[in-house]
Image: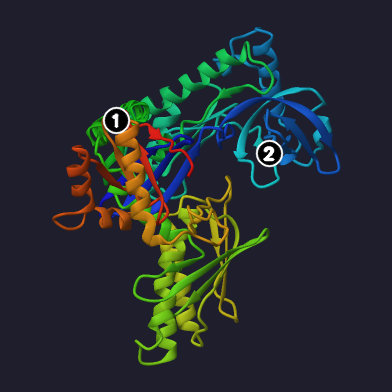
Amino acid sequence: MSNELVINSTQEGCRIALLRDKSLVEFHQEVDTNKFTVGDIYLGTVRKVVPGLNAAFIDVGYEKDAFLHYLDLGPQIRTLNKHVRNVIAKKNNGQQLGKTNAEPDIDKHGKINQVLNRNQQVLVQIVKEPISTKGPRLSCELSMAGRYLILVPFSSVVNISKKITDKNERKRLSRLVSSIKPEGFGVIIRTVASGKEVAELDRDLRNLVETWQEGMKKLQNAKPREKIIGEVGRASSLLRDVLNESFDSIVTDDDEIFSEVKSYIQTIAPNKEKIVKQYHGKIKLFENYGIEKQLKSLFGQSVTVPGGGYLIIEHTEALHVIDVNSGNKSNSEKDQETTALSVNKQAVGEIARQLRLRDMGGIIVVDFIDMRSSENKKAVYQTMREEMKTDRAKHTILPLTKFGLMQITRQRVRPELNIVTKEICPTCQGKGKVTPSILIADQVERDVDYLLGKQNEKSLTIALHPYLHAYFTNGLFSKRVDWFFKHKKWIHLEKDSSLGMMEYHFYNKAGEQIELPKA
């Protein structure tokens, strides 16, 4: 099984695709304008304390105040607040937590107005990005994730992932980490730490402590709303969480991202440095790996299930609904019950994939094809649990109900990914009236004549839909060959399936898009 990470740089940010055996299983869009990423730590200001909600609204620079509930303050909030005051007042540099005298833990059933006051400055961490009309959700229980460990300031406890079940390994890890962790910090040992040597764990821990120390230096002169410690980029955080021995390659088409990823790989896994490659091909990166086509087919309302059948995916404010249909599979089995079981089990794999791809969260209701047998219902439920094991988001799956419905809750910490797959006609701009498609070749030819004849362009590249590309290049004496004899210049044609059927763009020698005058 091959695992590849493909990172494409765009004007808005970058697009990250995780491929398993060339099939898209995870997709992320990192937009430069999105400042509030899960894991970021800010110096916030308390705007309003609401005893009725037992919560406070904090200004971290977002257009709406962020939400902080009493239960998310953490038992050591008074110690954190004292530490922040001392660092800002430069009474200490904040790097050695052992020097901060711990305050008593707060009461689990206390009130927020006993802990926070209006206009107070407080160090907070984003635990849920802004979604829809809501601002970010915050926590004062700070943590910083590394590859093998999670560093927890103002704690002294060493916790181990429940997924590490071997008793001897749990004892070994607990003993090792307890011997190397600095005073004033707690540590959570991640699942991937199993079997790792102390040198690797120590390197990961040192990196996290350095990140904390740099953040405390920044806090000394920080202004309200300022980011104190930033989570690594989406590409690096994905690498941190999914990079393992089975990873084959990481490919990017951007110099800056290439340097960032290579540097990060050198930090967390120096032996994997060679798998990072920079793409210099003429065809666009996502086009070359077949990702563009997969995005178009996987993010629509209707999604085909391999082996027959299809899903209809609908979204509402309260929940997501997925309907399973048999399609052309209905006559391929000996009876209705067998058909229903076959289609439902095949649909389960695609549903688990769609939840990860779209990052769907909250409540998901799946309407499977009706089955009478309780054994068959149980089989579908077990299959879904197996398929969802690789999902990193916290989730709960309930067995099928009497009516064949399955309820799933999945942790939502950032907005759901939505890609528009229906294309607006580039000619009519959605008005419903288009010029005859047979004239598109004449239109392109007129533009070529204008650019080469009147504008004297030295070199020309046209990006167009694969269907148009085939029309202009097929045959021994293709349209492109005609242009060569006419203008004595070879025109480069690039396939781009992200464009509409009759949409095309011209680029000059420097790779800059040429704006054509409107007809």
Asked which colour scheme the image uses, the reply is rainbow
Name the disc covering residue 72, or none: 2
Seen in the picture, residue 363 relative to 258 is either above or below; the reply is: below
Can the viewer see residue 159 in this picture? no
CB atoms of marks 1 and 2 within 8 Å: no
Mark 1 lies on residue: 509
Q: Is 171 left, or right, of 49 in this rendering?
A: left
331 or 372: which is nearer to us?
331
Name the disc covering residue 60, or none: none
Which quadrant is home to the N terminus? bottom left
Res. 316 visible in picture: yes
Residue at the image position 32 percent from the left and 42 percent from the top: 448
Q: Secondary structure at mark 2?
A: helix
User: Is 119 on the left or on the right of 379, as rendered?
Assistant: right
Above or below: residue 331 compared with residue 222: below
Amino acid under disc 1: Lys
- Marks 1/2: CA distance? 55 Å
Residue depicted at x 82% and y 37%: 111
Position of residue 40 measured from the top left corner of the image (x, y, whole percent): 57, 31
Residue 272 appears at what percent x and percent y? 25, 34
Q: Is residue 110 left or right of residue 386?
A: right
Closest to the observer: 140 or 137?
137
- Give the structural element (helix, strand or loop) at label 1: loop
Please provide percent x and percent y for residue 251: 29, 39
Judge the density around disc 1: few (<14), some (14-19), many (≥20) Cα neighbours within 10 Å.
Answer: few
